[in-house]
Amino acid sequence: MLDAYDLTQDAPPPGGAPFFGRVRLRTLIVLRWLAVFGQAASLLFVSLILGFALPLALCAAVVAASAILNLGLIITRDIQRLTSHHEAFVQLGFDVLQLTILLLLTGGLQNPFVVMLVAPVTIGVAALPPRYALGLAAIGLSGLGAMALFALPLPWIRGETLHLPPLYVAGLGTAFIIAVAFTAVYAWRIGHEAKRMGAALAATQAILAREQKLSAVGSLAAAAAHELGTPLATIQLTAREIAREAKDDVLRDDAELLVSQAKRCRDILQRLSAQRETHDKMHDRMAFRDALDEVAAPLRGLGASITLRADGVGPAPYLARQPELLYGLGNLIENAVEFAAGAVIIEGEWDADTIRISINDDGKGIAPDMLSRIGEPYISRRSGEIGGGMGLGTFIAITMIERLGGKAHFANGGELGGAIVHIQWPRNRVEAHEEAG
């Protein structure tokens, strides 16, 4: 049940999902077009409809710079590709500077649209590594300082000037700093969780695909036996005719060798075919207790004794062989064996609607602060602490259990007093159904 990834790290596995967090160039271009149209509409409304005095030519030049950048990118670049972190940083930095200059020309901190500076900073923090995100935040805060010192007056009714108290303007600046800090931390947290979850799900899909490929090996062997049987029979028959009619001893010996090797190949294929039929009976439809025993068998003798119990209402069910069920259950049993002091008990129950399995060990249990976080990927390292090791492996196990409509609940206690996990599935999702006829 060992994963192909290092489950002890607090970061996504190397090589697993390298593009998580990358921004598509088309996304940046679309967002910039929205900003261009919004800025142009606001300037025209303030100048032509409200009649406020503002440096319209300079403002139009600043807005046009964004439009020119977008047109240049559309002409020279493949807009469907993912940008590098550096490229995304440069473009978002340009957006912050462009908006800062526009605000400098239209009142600075007194302009209510100063809040729009938060948008590119938030996008950068969510999508870029910390050093680039901090760079964007620094550009935004530098622009804030520039607006406090060098901004032109806020456009207002001709002949009148709006004077805001300095204390109020200072409050606006402070509110902007807090807004940038709060949204940056919030976006970073959400983006970080999304990247880790995406990488963990990619690892889950890779492991599930591997399990499904292994399950398909038997089918491939049966197909080979069926397809190759006829041509081998033809080869054997032809070789026998050659051996019977050959007058040259060397040719006769070669033909007899060909007959014997063809017969050997047919015998091998017949054994494969017979094993496949047995395999179908044993694996595609497993008795409930046999399924528990099969999953636990590779873990016996690794330190902790494993006790199996199975009881329920009515005849014991037969489970369908499904990689999600076997891998998810096996991963949780492996965790129990690893952290047990000397014993693990696996109990299975069933009734007309539900199949339940509990796994209890006599270890130190799961740390209280970890119980609420189990199921998140990469939540700890295997450093020997109580509850250590509940990371990507447990996340994958829970994900596979839930794919079959099941639920897993973790706690401390049970008969052995250590960690215990209760798993249950709807019976119709995991039970094997006999084919008619």
Image (spheres, rainbow, N blue to C red):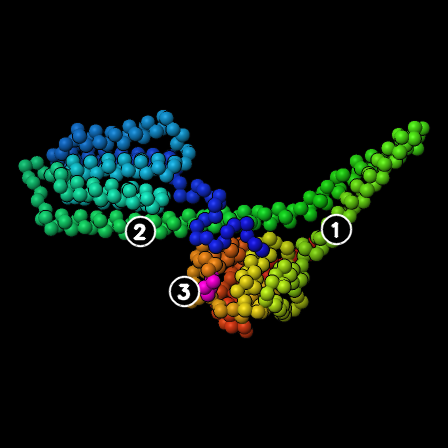
The answer to if 115 sits in the magenta stretch is no
Please identify the residue farthest to the left as the structure is shown.
159
Give the alpha-carbon distance from disc 2 to disc 3, as whole Å.
23 Å
Which region shows up in magenta? 384-388
Residue drawn at x 59%, y 47% as measured from the top left: 210
Name the residue nearer the viewer: 273 or 304: 304
- Say left or right for 68 vs 232: left
- Say left or right for 215 vs 365: right
| Residue 319 in the image, given as x and y percentages of width and height | 64, 59
Q: Which of the 4 quarters of the picture holds residue 306?
A: bottom right
Residue drawn at x 77%, y 44% as measured from the top left: 269
| Residue 119 in the image, given as x and y percentages of width and height | 28, 43
Viewport quadrant of the N terminus: bottom right
- Say left or right for 256 vs 20: right
What amino acid does circle 2 point to? Val
Residue 125 disc label: none
Residue drawn at x 41%, y 49% as measured from the top left: 194
| Residue 180 in the image, given as x and y percentages of width and height | 25, 48
The answer to whether residue 336 is above or below residue 114 is below
Give the residue pinned by disc 1. Answer: 275
The answer to whether residue 14 is above or below residue 368 is above
- Disc 3 to disc 1: CB gap under 8 Å: no
Give the residue pinned by disc 3. Answer: 369
Q: Within 10 Å of the Cα at label 1, are there few (<14), some (14-19), or many (20+) other Cα atoms?
A: some
Please identify the residue farthest to the top as the structure is shown.
75
Q: Within 10 Å of the Cα at label 2, are there few (<14), some (14-19), or many (20+) other Cα atoms?
A: some
The answer to whether residue 181 is above or below residue 418 is above
Name the residue nearer the viewer: 277 or 392: 392
What amino acid does circle 3 point to? Asp
| Residue 242 in the image, given as x and y percentages of width and height | 89, 31
